[in-house]
Amino acid sequence: MNNLYQRDFLRLLDFTYLELKNIIILAQKLKKNKKNKKEIALLKKKNIALIFEKESTRTRCAFEVAAFDQGANVTYLGPGSTHLGTKESIEDTAKILGRLYDGIQYRGHNHSTIEILAKHSKVPVWNGLTEKFHPTQLLADLLTIKEIFPEKKFHQIKCAYVGDAHNNMGNSLLEAALLVGLDLRLVAPKECWPEKDLFHFCQEQIKQKKGSITCTENIHKGVKNVDFIYTDVWVSMGEPQEAWEKRIKLLRSYQVNSSMLEMTHNPKVKVLHCLPALHDQKTYMGKSILKKYNFKNGMEITDDIFQKYQEVIFEQAENRLHTIKAILISSLLNKITF
Ligand code: CP
Ligand code: NVA
């Protein structure tokens, strides 16, 4: 019997450390099998609904390719393409989708929506990002960390997350750190620290384990001796355009650049980014915002640093596929054998 069968995945704390570890081990096996062209399709005849109220490249493609690789079918329900919450309640939509599909992925504006979907659909519901959490991203991040340090235990890993920690990534990193016991430092101005309740809960609970969670405004202190520097965009999807000005003022000195990397005193430090990244002017947003606020070389991360660490960053992005596949299999199959 698989412990995760029929379980929802709305946030990392829905799982125990052991359950999370098993998903990562399964993802490693699935990645190896796919690379060796030995993948076995275990999800034939399963149907999966993908609700996206916000844009996505990695998450949508990872869910779709994971499903196709495993023989499942998907229906993509993009922004504005269902009655969800407009002409039909979330509860009623959950009831009908739960009758048609074996599982539902939701990316959207309100975490409360996914909670209602999970409550009323009777099938597993997976969080592909809400304003509060981005748990499937963290599965890929933990797999990437494990691949880089296969011999180390998670509690031996020091990770500084620098930038807007008051977002879904900040919250999910806190939960991941608590579960696996990372030494996590959230390095940001006070205004960008996570919500107090979740922060204090995780900080208190981790005391019973190895690992630690801290928040600091001090970059030197926060990044000293870390194995990883992790960053994310400074303004998240769904936030108003006006947020940029204030956020840039607060975060300008928290840019991941070569001087910050020197402050780690670790020549082997690695950089992670959940992507998409504003590291150059090759996008519409990059052109307009970087120019408007006079950034010469990327925003949350400079282009030279992005290029230098791109192998890790794109491996991290590829790992979305393998970990999402692991979560689909874990929640849709009672017994996993291959
Ligand atoms: N990291 C991530 O979730 O990317 P997408 O927005 O492209 O899905
Ligand atoms: N914090 C970002 C994460 C993107 C993957 C956002 O919500 O837009």
Image (tube, rainbow, N blue to C red):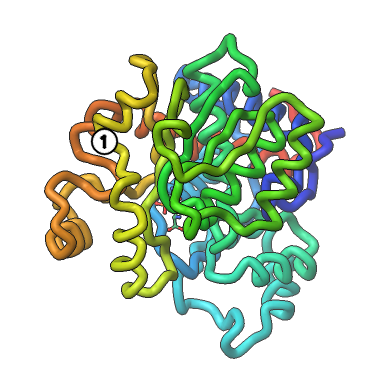
Q: Residue 17: image x %, image y %? A: 75, 32
Image point (54%, 49%), residue name: 170
The number of discs equals 1
Q: Residues within 10 Å of mark 1 (few under 14, many from 20)?
A: some
Is any part of residue 122 visible from this angle? Answer: yes
Q: Which residue type does callout 1 highlight?
A: Asn
Disc 1 Cβ-to-ligand 2 distance below 8 Å: no
- Residue 275 position in % (x across, y down): 37, 46
Q: Secondary structure at mark 1?
A: loop
- The residue at the point 21 percent across, 46 percent down is 298
Mark 1 highlights which residue? 257
Q: Residue at x 64, y 39 (%)?
A: 176
Tell me where residue 272 sits by quadrant. top left
Report the residue at 74% width, 49% height from top.
201
| Outermost bottom residue | 87
**Relative to 309, 72 lies left or right:** right
The quarter of the rendered structure image containing the N terminus is top right
Towards the viewer: 64 or 100: 64
The x, y position of residue 310, in whole percent, is 29, 30
Left or right? Give the position of 257 relative to 50: left
Percent position of residue 257, x then y? 26, 35
Ligand 2: image quarter? bottom left
The quadrant where residue 326 appears: top right
Q: Quadrant of the C terminus?
A: top right
Work out which residue is located at the far top of the displayed protein and give it.
151
Residue at the farthest right position: 1
> Quarter of the image holding residue 330?
top right
Instruction: Looking at the picture, tell me which residue is in the foreground, 259 or 133.
Output: 259
User: Can residue 71 be spotted in the picture?
Assistant: no
Q: Is residue 334 left or right of residue 283?
A: right
